[in-house]
Amino acid sequence: MSKGSPQEYTERYKGCGGEAKCEQDIRKEMAKESAENVQKLKSCWEAGDSACVEAIGKEIELSEKAYTELRQQDNMAGRAYETLAQHYADIIANCADCGWLEAALAKTVAGGLTDIAYGALGVGSLPKPGQAGGSARDAKLSQSEINEIVNIPKGQRPDPSTYMSKAEMDAHLAKFEDGAVRFTSMSDVKKYGTLGPDNGFVMPKSEFDKLIKESSGNLRIIEKRLGLESGYLGNSNTGAFYIKRQDLKNLKIPSGNESGANQFWLPGGKTSGGISEAVMDFSHKPNALLIDLSKYNGGK
């Protein structure tokens, strides 16, 4: 967003007093403003006008700290736009592949600037028209319900069965029929002899394959999609392990009480970047295959 906008929207959020339509209108305006800024950058790059890029860059708020209070008012939107600050910086620095912009702009205009549009804007991966979009929840939760759950102290959050139907939970876990993938520290694996703790996070193998293709194995992009802090995965110390379906013990939807649930966690079984997730028991040390990320091309 433009400089000063995060603070302005924060004050407007406070004035809503929790009224749903008021907050929804603000989210739409934030999405529209961000889409317009992206369009300006796109036009500058297509024209080969570096001075234009520099000028637009000076108008955009690139500090993640500027979005912190906004996140406190609206967890989903604020987290999305914290990520967007870095995403703008990435575009300004190097726009070698801006193909995703077409889908971004088409969706925000034709789709009525829905919650899905603004959420996806934050991770730089907007859904194409007709697709559900990465930020959609598997659970049918309103924004106020999401906020309420997230604001409950870690360790006291409700079990997903209290806000997801059995059908929703079964459909979510069915995504792991082809197995799961866990990113973890190679040094930790060597030190502890396990891929993780009980209730360690995993993602569906099918979505891992898609993510590798979309990100070209760039760990910074992967971190954003997984809802991790930048640099969390490291580089040479990061391992991705494939676990077959039969070895997924006690697979379940995260409650947000897990030791690995960070400040970006959201209820409903998806990361803040729209990737499906689950937790499983690693105490039985399941058989796992280390994936060579330098050579892996998404299972093809």
Image (cartoon, helix red, strand yellow):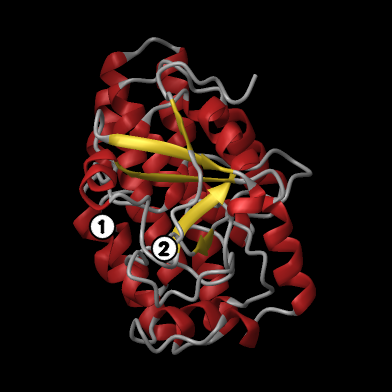
Q: Residue furthest top?
A: 48
The quadrant where residue 135 appears = bottom right
Where, by quadrant of the figure, is residue 45 drawn? top left
Foreground: disc 1 or disc 2? 2
Residue 132 placement (x, y as % from top left): 72, 51
Residue annotated with mark 1: 4
- Marks 1/2 in contact by CB < 8 Å: the verdict is no
Q: Position of residue 172 (x, y in %)?
A: 69, 62
Horizontal placement of 162 versus 214: left or right? Answer: right
- N-terminal of the two: label 1 or label 2? 1
Q: Residue type at mark 2: give it.
A: Ser
Taking the spot 70% from the left edge, 52% from the top edge, the residue there is: 175
Residue 158 in sight: yes
Point out the image quarter for the C terminus.
top right
The numbered dot on residue 235 is: none
Q: Amino acid at mark 1?
A: Gly
Q: Secondary structure at mark 2?
A: loop
**Left or right for 144, reference 57:** right
Q: Which residue sits at x=65%, y=49%?
A: 245
Q: CA distance from mark 1 to mark 2?
A: 49 Å
Q: Residue at x 52, y 55 (%)?
A: 119
Residue lying at 55% horizontally and 76% vertically, measured from the top left: 143
Circle 2 is placed at which residue position? Answer: 283
